[in-house]
Image: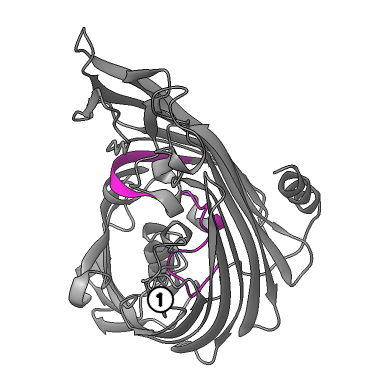
Amino acid sequence: MKKFLLLLGAVCAMSVCAQNSHPLHKNRPLNILLGEVADSVKVMEAFMENSPADYRVPNSPRFAIVGKNEKFYLGFGGYVKGTMSFDWGSPIDNYNEFIVSQIPMPGQQKPGNKGQFGLSAQQSDLYLNLVALPNDKNKVGFYLNFIFLGNGYLPEVRQAYVTWRGFELGYGFSLFTDLAADPSTIDYEGPNSFTVDINAKFDYRHTFGKYFGIGIGAELPMASYINGTHTSTVTQRIPDIPMYLQWDWGNNNRIRLSALLRNMQYRSNGWDGKTQNLAGGGIQLTGNFNICNKLIGYYQATVGKGMTSYFEDVTGDGYDMAPCPTDPSKLQTVKAWGGYLGLQYNWSSKVYSNLIYSHLRLYTPNYGTAGTFDGDSAPWASQYKYGQYAVANVFYNITDTFSWALEYIWGRRVDMNCAQAHDNRIQTMLQVTF
């Protein structure tokens, strides 16, 4: 961890030039199918403001309908993305998401399963972007997009929200997720330590002048925990509270400090039989920086307890709380930290590469009756201890419609009993955006 923080600090101390941080996330030609508009740039800006900062979704639609007297702008688009991959080592059974925590450990992998070929088009995306009253202070936005990661290519809603005067209500990426600090990968999962959550939410954002911004929200709680012999799960009744302060001084130089507050409930089935509360949360530093006119950095450093559901690699795996090793009727929050550093080099206006390293570590307590278990026989022995993720890729925007990419990923999982396994993946992508 010390080496990672020293490297992060050294790179953050560098400065200064300009490039678009996500070359795939850029303006594209806009075709007005119906209606007339005096200034198409204004229409594009309205769509961009209402769209997420996620590089996976183009920030401006290809087609648009303009209402009478420009009372609304309706844009729609998407892309078809095909991927081909080959894994060797201990292959993950997922062609789209390289999830380090799902690497089969020794004893889990079937004999002969040392390699795996994959083809998929499930990352393809469709979206709709609507801005009503675009020239009024009461401007209303609506955004909806689908991806096909469900079983049998069933579409899944990825985002569906309404915006008004800085408020955002609906379903989408948590306010704690800094999408602009997410480096580009073919892998839909991305860095294993990235704090990303798609959730129901009611958020508020506001900017002060050119440089400063704030945000705060109330979002659906999603506590995921391991019960002990004398605890049980109950419904959650207090929302998660994310918030941030941001300083953006332009030219892809930006820093965001975020915090997350949580209060989780569980049932203690001890002699008093009460519902118990545990506080959790974390702090996070994210951002982007220019090193020179072609080299851009991305970074994230997060630490907390009782908030592992927000780490992409272990979402829903039960690590927010775990049984207390000295009292089977109590749970305790799990400490965790994670971070990544990504560098993007823009070879030209059409070609760029990324180099990323990510690390996530959990401190799951040695739950079970104290003194009863040790070594490999402990019930916690096969629990996730830490994961590493590294990726190198190159993207080529052949035209504003057609893109190609090539990527290599390495991942390693280590459990509490020091058992470990790794997977390698090389994959390529063809994407047609419309």
Q: In the rendered image, which quarter is residue 183 located in?
A: bottom right
Looking at the image, residue 426 lies above or below residue 134: below
> Which of the image's four quarters has the C terminus?
bottom left
Q: Is residue 185 magenta?
A: yes
Q: Observer-nearest residue: 252 or 305? A: 305
Q: Amino acid type of disc 1?
A: Pro
Q: Is residue 235 visible?
A: yes
Q: In the rendered image, which quarter is residue 66 located in?
A: bottom left
Q: Observer-nearest residue: 158 or 401? A: 158
Q: Position of residue 408 (x, y in %)?
A: 58, 77
Looking at the image, residue 60 lies above or below residue 172: below
Q: Observer-nearest residue: 304 or 431? A: 304
Task: Residue at 45%, 80% (x, y): give it.
Answer: 28
Regarding mark 1 in the picture, which secondary structure is present there?
loop
Our reading of the magenta stretch's main secondary structure is loop
Q: Which residues are magenta?
A: 181-206
